[in-house]
Image (spheres, rainbow, N blue to C red):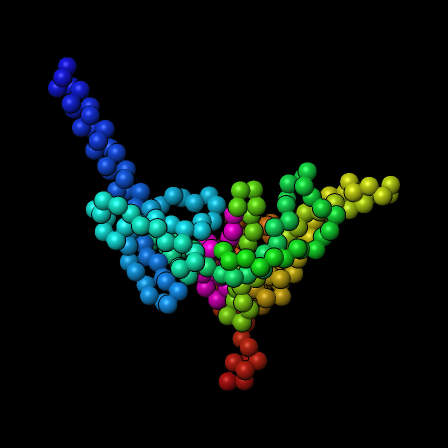
């Protein structure tokens, strides 16, 4: 009985130790001055975009350290996730039915946030999640990072009551203007939903297709 108890305790200890080791995975971070440090970052599988992270210099270190968005411009876990810091204007208008407004226009506020890179190339797609709030951002070689605009709002009905649900789908116009090739069709963009799956597929397809030549490139 005593031997069995010792075996059980040993097994639980090994399991706990293994979990602790697995939770810290190979990654890196880049400080404000550009210094890149290889390390092991605690993978919390962030549902919300983080403002800090825990790391170890060596995997067998007893203690971990913490870095924050104030000091770090980028960090990532190899082959899994990358977060990049931006000072950017973001609209936090709620999409929840009981919190919708009657204004279709975004209400921007400048914030410093980590954006998660979803796909990277000639056009890069980012995401930001904070509880029920989900926003997507993009940038190209000529356009700085900006929010893809999608807003649900109420329109007034015939009785002047805000009861008609409407959508501002400006993100489709943004993509049709700034992220398309000669093969991109208007129908293709109209069908795009404002979600991770649709947008990621669209950006991957765009990045795998040779972009349009600029006027200068055509001359050469």
Say which of 46 and 175 sits in front. Answer: 46
Image point 32% across, 54% down: which residue?
27
Q: Residue furthest right?
A: 159
Left/right placement of residue 92 relative to residue 104 reads: left
Q: Residue furthest bottom?
A: 220
Identify whether 9 is placed above or below 22. Answer: above
Is 197 one of the magenta-colored residues?
Answer: no
Which percent across, then down, holds residue 200? 50, 53
Q: Position of residue 49 (x, y in %)?
A: 47, 49
Above or below, 86 relative to 52: below
Q: Is residue 60 left or right of residue 165?
A: left
Residue at figure coordinates x 51%, y 51% from the top left: 128
Please name the residue shown 62% across and 62% down the image. Answer: 174
Residue 118 among those drawn in magenta: yes
Q: Which residues are magenta?
A: 114-129
Give 36 or 151, whichever is nearer the viewer.
Answer: 36
Q: Which residue of the protein is positioned furthest toward the left in this rendering?
A: 3
Nearer to the camera, 4 or 110: 110
Residue 179 in the figure: left or right of residue 15: right
Q: Is residue 189 visible?
A: no
Residue 220 in the image: x percent, y percent? 50, 85
Callout count: 0
Q: Is residue 142 visible?
A: yes
Main SS category, magenta section: strand
Q: Name the quadrant of the N terminus.
A: top left
Outermost residue to the top: 1
Which residue is depicted at the point 45% across and 64% down? 121
**Residue in front for this viewpoint, 197 or 41:** 41
User: x, y (%) of residue 25?
Assistant: 30, 48
């Amino acid at each position: 009985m005593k031997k069995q108890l010792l075996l059980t305790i040993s097994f639980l200890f090994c399991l706990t130790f293994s979990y602790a080791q697995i939770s810290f995975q190979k990654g890196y971070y880049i400080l404000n001055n550009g210094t890149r440090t290889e390390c092991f970052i605690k993978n919390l599988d962030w549902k919300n975009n983080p403002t800090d992270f825990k790391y170890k210099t060596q995997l067998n270190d007893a203690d971990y350290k913490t870095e924050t968005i104030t000091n770090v411009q980028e960090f990532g876990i190899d082959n899994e996730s990358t977060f990049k810091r931006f000072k950017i204007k973001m609209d936090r208008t709620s999409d929840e039915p009981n919190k919708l407004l009657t204004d279709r226009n975004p209400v921007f506020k400048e914030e410093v946030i980590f954006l998660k890179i979803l796909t990277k190339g000639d056009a890069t797609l980012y995401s930001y999640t904070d509880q029920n709030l989900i926003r997507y951002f993009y940038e190209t070689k000529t356009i700085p990072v900006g929010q893809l605009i999608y807003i649900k709002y109420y329109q007034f009905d015939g009785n002047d009551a805000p009861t008609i649900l409407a959508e501002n789908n400006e993100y489709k116009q943004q993509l049709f203007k700034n992220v398309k090739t000669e093969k991109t069709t208007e129908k293709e963009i109209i069908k795009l939903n404002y979600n991770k799956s649709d947008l990621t597929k669209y950006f991957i397809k765009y990045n795998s297709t040779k972009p349009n030549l600029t006027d200068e490139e055509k001359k050469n």
